[in-house]
Amino acid sequence: MREKIIVVGGGFAGLQFARKLNNKTGQKVMMIDKVNHHMFQPLFYQVACGRIEPSNISFPFRKIFQKSRNIQFRMTEVTEVIPEENKIVCKDGTFTYDKLVIATGCKTNFFGNHKMEELTFGMKDTQQAISIRNHVLLTFEKLIIERKRTDDGNWNIVIVGSGPTGVELAGAFSEMKKEILPRDYPHMNFDDLKIILISATDEPLANMSEEAQKKSEEYLEDFGVDFMKGEFVTDYDGNKIYTKSGKEIASNNVIWAAGVTGNIIDGFPENEMLRNRYIVDRHNKLKGFDNIYAIGDIAYMETPKYPQGHPQVANVAINQAKTLASNFLKKDKEKWTDFEYIDRGSMATIGKHRAVVDLPKFKFQGLLAWYFWMFLHLMLILSVRNKLAIFFNWMWSYFNKDSSLRLIIIPTKQDATEQ
């Protein structure tokens, strides 16, 4: 009888793990996710700014595994794990397993501020990126109707957090302000529209090199981004942002990109977690369990090279998934390979012709870095059709300084009396 493996989550880690075991005769794999598609998160900011369609970076699981003989997919949300019964509880039923792989990834970290969570926008899934696009575009429509009578908060787009997501959003919105809005709204003056990036650190991209930090700040300044360094946001009431230093910023468009926290599933003692991540050994096995594993952002693994755990980035998730799947294919557990992360570098783009790249042996910025960023991200897209669609959109935007994807699509519920 084939071993039954359940993998919870279809992000970079979960998808890579399943693909590695695809059509392998010894394992029966069930993937569970609360949405029916894999999402390419590094390009969410381009969806939020109307650069590319959500479908271009979303890949249905059933399509991916259409020809698989051993992988099934179930769309539901896991609410609890019962380890002593080898069972997971979902909103739509329960499933048993021989081995469980948790790859639930992360969600936006609001640091316990429920008001901030309710009133600001995160950007960890496709729907959130679409919501940002809708909200910002509706703000522009409101501006053209109300003109100077409009609320001051409509004139400020505030991004909290200066990691890659924050700086990429700031650059993209600044390009929109300069190149697109004057053409879409020719009778409006957008000089008063401010793109504000609030950073708790003194430099953007705190996890990258000093050269990348300085250059990215220079790029943000070139784009006219108001970079507020060393500022901590303490509160937001839906109309104003409040900072620790006492500043107040009017804004109806606040995007929270200041951190992430693990998507924890109920059923495990707190002493088996650290920093809201599951403690795992070098084989990604959960502390205290023989048949439960965690991979990707949700896994906390200490190694000599990474005594404080690995960074929560896609490359770690993908390689942990590959290593664990390869180990599962080995009959002799004594031959399992310990996970060792090799840092391939990091990068970020801050608008057209402006990017920073940190590789292990050298660093570069500017036009070459921008082309390198585009090429690498394009190669990581799953399907040829999607690669071509994104490439076409990028080329169109490059030569025309425009895009035609600024659709405001808000779902409505049909009135029961009309049915």
Image (spheres, rainbow, N blue to C red):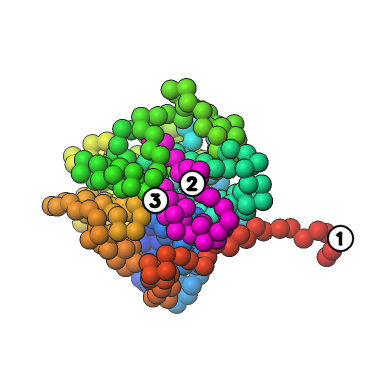
- The answer to whether residue 375 is left or right of residue 129 is left
Q: Position of residue 312 (x, y in %)?
A: 34, 45
Q: Is residue 359 above or below residue 66?
A: above
Instruction: Say the numbered circle drawn on residue 133.
Output: none
Magenta-colored span: 170-199
Q: Looking at the rendering, which quadrant does residue 27 occupy?
A: bottom left
From where the camera sits, is residue 147 visible? yes
Three-letter residue code for mark 2? Asp
Q: Residue at x 62, y 60 (%)?
A: 409
Who comes first in sequence, dot 1 or dot 3? 3
What is the chief secondary structure element of the magenta stretch? helix
Residue 10 forms part of the magenta stretch: no
Marks 1 and 2 sit apart, C-alpha to C-alpha, by 47 Å
Instruction: Please name which of the two marks, 1 or 3, marks the residue nearer to the observer.
Output: 3
Identify the residue position indicated by label 1 in the image.
Answer: 417
Identify the residue position indicated by label 2 in the image.
Answer: 191
Q: Residue at x 57, y 38 (%)?
A: 153
Q: Residue at x 47, y 26 (%)?
A: 247
Q: Are marks 1 and 3 in contact (CB under 8 Å)?
A: no
Identify the residue position indicated by label 3 in the image.
Answer: 171
